[in-house]
Each structure stands twice: as C-alpha cells, then as structure tokens.
Image (spheres, rainbow, N blue to C red):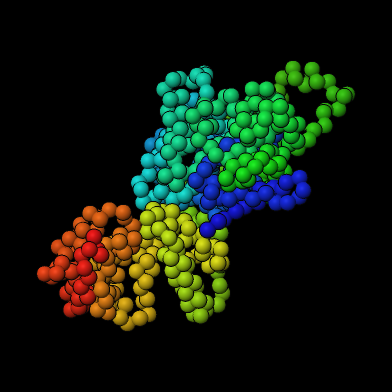
Amino acid sequence: MSASVIIGSDPSGAPVPVDIEELLATRLLVQGNSGSGKSHLLRRLLEESASLVQQVVIDPEGDFVTLAEPFGHVVIDGSAYSGDEIARLAARIRKHRASVVLALDGLELEAQMRCAAQFLATLFDAPREEWYPALVVVDEAQIFAPAAAGDVSDEVRRLSLAAMTNLMCRGRKRGLAGIIATQRLAKLAKNVAAEASNFLMGRTFLDIDMVRAADLLGMERRQAEQIRDLARGHFLGLGPAISRRPVAVKIGDVRTRARNVIQGLTPLPAAGQDMEALLLAEPAVPEPVPCAMPLGPEAADSGELLEQIASYVPAGEEAEVSTEPSLFAAQEQAAGVSAVLAELAAEPDCTFQPVAALFQDFTLRCRMKRIAGHGLDVTAFRRRFALAVAGADEADPDWAELLRIAGDVQDDLVAPFLVIARAAQRGEPCPDDAELSRIYGTSSPGRIRRLLEHFEKAGLIVVRTDFGGRRSIGIPALGATTAPVDQDVTG
C-alpha cells in the first residue's frame, strides 16, 4: 500500500510526490548552501506527512518548534533536562509513537552533540515490540556527523557519529528512517551520507560539493554547473521514493514558519539621531536583571512531559466528537476496522512482518478509509490481527466457542491454534506444516514441531500418528479431532 505526499511541482507544473513508505526503507539526504531552502523543504515534508507517520526532529536551531500547535508535536527543550531524563523521554517516545521536536538551540555545540547522541541511541535501542516506523529528521547533520575532528572532544564526536551511523546504517530494521540535511556534503561523514538512496540537492556554489552532488544524482560532471544556478526553494531530486530519473522540484508552500525568520529589511534609525550619545550615555535606571522577566514559557517538568508523551495522539487520529452518539455509526466503524484487518491479513507474507510495522500499516489503512480513532493499541491489535489471520468470525456461534477455548493462548500463538481447532471442529484434514508455518510466520519446520509440542504440554491439543504415518490433532476442550493427513504432506 502506497502513501505519497506532494512536496512541490516540476517545471511543467505537475506535482512531485514522495512515497513515504518507500522513504521509510531508503532514507533521504538533503543538501544546499545556507539560504537554499533546506529548512523549507523539510518543513513541507513534515507538514504533509504529519498524519501518516511518527516524526522525530533533531532541531539544532529551534526552527521546527512551531509544528507543535497545528500538528501536535511535543517540544522537548534539550537544555532543560539531564542526560537520564532525555533517555527516559526518548524511550517513551518510541513506546507511545509521539511526534516530537528536540530543540537544541539553548545548548553549546558539544552539549548539542552529546544530547542528540543520547537521544538517538535510546531510540535505536528500543525493545523490538516498539519498532514502529518513524521519520527521524536531523537538520544541520554536519554538526552531529562531522567528516573531520573539530572543536569538540574526541569522545563526544565518537558518541555523536556512532549514533548517526546507527540511524542511517542500521535504523531501517528498527523502523527509523533517517532524513538528514546539510549545508555541505564535504563536511558530512561519508559513511553517514552514503546510506541514503534518495537525494534532494539545492543551490551549491563550491566546486567540490557541486561535483559530489552531481555524482549522487547520476549527472555528468559538466552538468554540475546547473546546481549553482538553482533558485531558492528549487531542488533536483532522485531516488526510489521520488523519481527514477533526476527531476527538478519547486518546493510548495508551508503552513508554519520558523520563529526567528527575518522578513526583509528593517528601516534604520533616523539620520538625525546622535547615535554616539545614545551608546555612551549612562543608563537612567539600573538595567533589569536578565532572569527577572522570563523570555518565554518555562520548560515542562520531565514528569509532566512524560505524561504529555504518554497521552499523545498522532495527528489525523483524533476522533471526531459527536454530540449524538449513534449505535449504527459505532457498528459501522467496528465493521470497517474488521474489514481493514481482514484486508491486511490477506496480504502475502503479512505474518512474517514485525507487529510494529503491521500496526502502522493498519493505522494508515484506517485513515485512508476515513475510520477515525480505530480504538486499538498495539497489544489489542496483535490479538485482533491473529484472529483475522485465522479467519475468525466472532458473530458465528461456532467461532465463539473456539475463541472461548483460546482465551488463555498467547497472542502470537493464537492464530495457528485456532486454525487447528477449526479444522477439528469441522472434521477437516489436519493443517500441514507449510500452512502452519505461513500462519505462524516462520520458515523453520523445527519451530512448528516445537509449537505443537508446546500446545500439547499445555493440554490444548493431542497429537496422534497412526500406523500409516498419518497425523491427526485432537482438541480435548472440543471433544473433536481433525481428519488424519499423511506425514509426507506435513513434512
């Protein structure tokens, strides 16, 4: 299932889409000199995909905190929390799929690198059941993955570079899709930049960066000059999530803007003012103490922020409040959720996918069908998806009996058990090992044998093999047995 967003238009005015699902698997590198429109491009991508996927923004300049109000991003002020608190916040972010902006503008360079490294490392080390797909946007990536040693200690540089390398090289299997933006490719560590398969290249003046950008775009070196001539907000794009051939893109409009953006020129003071006198004059009253008047809202206590993350609802999932609740509408929504689960369970090899990826796909399908607030967390989804794989119909009295028997079976084991129990209930042949492997999501025959042994030890089934080598499986709670099937079929 494809989910695309429009980031702009090509020279003919045709829309240029970005496939978010493909982007999750292939990552993105954005390059452009200061003023080329990199932040505008990132903002457009974030705004358009906010309702489709979790977003984590590493923001060294505080440019993206304005996403909070319209799109619900949680803003974390990196300067207000200790390293342990940052780690706890990052762990909660993965667990609750909260979209956040980590604002680092209140920190010095070395502190920014240390904070971002600890934050990214915690996201990367999340337990497997929390590997939900997420876009991890790192602006000014050359700060966190420098190509050469700078003014920071070797220890901090190694920590930051290791975290960025893990994000770009190994993050995909953990659901983390890196989107990195840099002013100069020459300043960015090559092993970090090399992992991106999608590129958006903006205006660049230095020859070394133009040539490298042209190489990444598959252009001849004599064509590199056109990168120097790109206007602000114009990029050349290439990659499986964008286009198979280089395409010129004019980035579209955005709904938010940075807090510190400068709009044009500000008139100078009147020429008649005696500026020297103003600068050298003694103050009439004592200057206020800087901290006497807060310049902005205080950072939330870490406990409050953890609660905010825990209660986070992704943009686009807010359930519409109805003044007149309708039983029919509730039944219609429940039927829609069941239909989406059945559709997902019918996908080839769906049982071989991580639960986190399946849950993200399920949520996206519900949004596409305008099912607001499906009401399932990942635990409830795991059970419902297993029932859908087994083909269970809760309205059928025969299935109701099977579901009662399977009430204590673990969520990841319930689908194969129900398939076996359904065959016994109907007196049908015992499912072969290939079918059980598909339902259980494994390629190992040994795991199926161990699965059946586990069911038998738990008293859920009784496996019989007759003198002809045919296997049948009985369900004591049903008092029924499957029809025997030749072991050559079951492997």
Q: Which of 306 and 401 is in front in this view?
A: 401
Residue drawn at x 39%, y 62% is: 381
Residue drawn at x 46%, y 28% is: 161
The image shows residue 61, relative to residue 126, as above or below, that is above
Residue drawn at x 85%, y 24% is: 273
Give the image location of residue 255, x and y in percent: 68, 50
Give the image location of residue 9, x and y in percent: 72, 48
Left or right position of 269 against 20: right
Residue drawn at x 82%, y 32% is: 267
Residue positioned most to the bottom: 397
* Image quadrant containing the C terminus: bottom left
Q: Nearer the viewer, residue 212 or 332?
A: 212
Left or right position of 451 against 314: left
The image shows residue 77, relative to residue 150, as above or below, that is below
Residue 269 is drawn in which quadrant?
A: top right
Residue positioned most to the right: 272
Can the viewer see residue 32 in this picture? no
Give the image location of residue 42, x and y in percent: 62, 42
Can the viewer see residue 11 in this picture? yes
Residue 485 is drawn in which quadrant?
A: bottom left
Left or right position of 205 against 348: right
Q: Nearer the viewer, residue 315 or 410?
A: 410
Number of marks? 0
